[in-house]
Image (cartoon, rainbow, N blue to C red):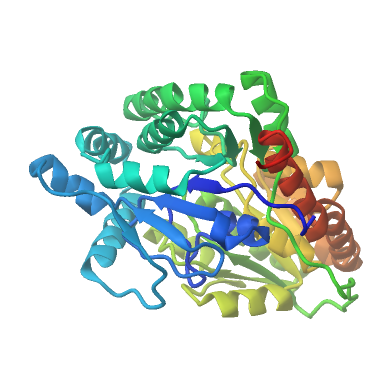
Amino acid sequence: MNKIRLPKVLVVGINAWREDGTAHTLMDIFRCWDPDRLALVYTRADLPDTDVCKRYFQISENQIIGSVLKPWEKVGRVVENTPIVKQSEVEAEHARYTQAHKQSSSLLPLLREIVWKFGHWKSPALKKFVLDFNPDIIFIPIYPVAYMGRIQRYITKLTKKPTVCYLADDNYSYDSCRNLFSYIHRFWLRHQVEPIARNCREMFVIVEKEKEDTDRRFGTDSRILTKSIDFTGKTYIHRQPAKPLKFIYTGSMIIGRDSTLALVSDAINEVNRQKGEVKAEMYIYSQTEPCDGILRRINTGASHFCGRIGRDEVLKLQKEADVVIFAEALEGKEANVAKLSFSTKITDYISNGKCVLAIGKDYIAPIDYFQRNDAAIIAHSPNEIVEQISRIVDNPGLIDEYGEKAFNCAVRNHEKGMMTRRFIETMLHAVGGKIE
């Protein structure tokens, strides 16, 4: 595979690729590629910093906002890898997105789309960058924002080159829409997603349930592509559980996960009360600050809210846990947000051989994945959360049993060599299997 001359790929995405950043998925996928045959057009204020790619074109949102008010100002620029980024533009953008997530507003995404609609991103500088690179393939991650679809379609028409798509969430159906604003936004998004998906040469998806849905909707024959794991010299390590058992949650508490974790807290305290002693404890680490009502429920008895910690400490705590918790919403439209998604935390958990307590509706893709592979202890409702925690407490041997099942599932589905071969073969097939 290494002797094959790889096609030149232009990725059109949102995030800058930084080794110290949080958005690693696309960067990790392309670690197998020749950096000289890879370029990225992206739309964040951050500057890139990785050896994976050498050519970048940035269209920052701050520039777009400025161009609406001052159409004569230049938008877009060629940038280079920059190890340290501390600038007001980056901080302002981060603050804007943090505030938007905190408010959980359906109007803000619409306002952002309007700004991008009237912003002057279609610049001579962008056209020159794309044509000078002269890619063989346009790689298109499908995002839940319509403005990215417009940029991607413009570049595709400009180059007239085949496209390969990557769909890692439900960015098409109305299932997660909560109000009129979110329905309008999804309507705009669908007008971009459908032509992109139907006209792509190849389609990647992230999990089996999404493959079934995507192929049915768009007539594709998609291939599954997830975060890959290098298992060289790695075997499952059996371990004795602690006393009391340690349940750990690390991650965000948005879109209803906070309410689910409150149910877990209630369940752990109830099981301990029934047993007459502390048999299990839960520790929650998250940068999301829950509301006062939720905080009181998850920070009581044997349940502890511990706030934000660094990535290195997250990995350390996950390894020390007896049970790691994967939680999605159980009620309302929020329960549908993860319908076709697959968190990278899942591959982290199972590749480290952790026993997973997975909580969510049975029809969402992550829970469907765990069920198909028998790779987690699963609860679909508040009553089942209590039942499963009680079951684990009464039978701590389940922790080692499901830890080994999870590890074997990771080897079977996410081994690095297998995933890399699948990715390269599919990309080559998109250009007829050869490069002139």
**Image location of residue 275, percent across then percent down:** 78, 68
Q: Is residue 197 depicted above or below 427 in this figure?
A: above
Between 322 and 82, the residue placed more toward the observer is 82
Instruction: Tell me the quadrant of the picture where the C terminus can be found.
Output: top right
Res. 316 in view: yes
Q: Is residue 106 depicted above or below 85 in this figure?
A: above
Please give left or right for residue 105 compared with residue 386 in the image. Answer: left
Res. 377 in view: no
Between 391 and 168, the residue placed more toward the observer is 168
**Image location of residue 192, percent across then percent down:** 43, 26
Q: Is residue 129 depicted above or below 34 in this figure?
A: above
Instruction: Tell me the quadrant of the picture where the N terminus can be found.
Output: bottom right
Report the label total.
0
- What residue is drawn where x is 60% and y is 36%? 164
**Image location of residue 347, percent across then percent down:** 71, 58
Q: Quadrant of residue 429?
A: top right
**Image location of residue 50, percent across then percent down:** 51, 69
- What residue is drawn where x is 52% and y is 62%? 53
Q: Quadrant of residue 187?
A: top left
Between 181 and 419, the residue placed more toward the observer is 419
- What residue is drawn where x is 47% and y is 67%? 18
Please give left or right for residue 163 compared with residue 271 in the image. Answer: left
Between 165 and 158, the residue placed more toward the observer is 158
- What residue is drawn where x is 42% and y is 65%? 48
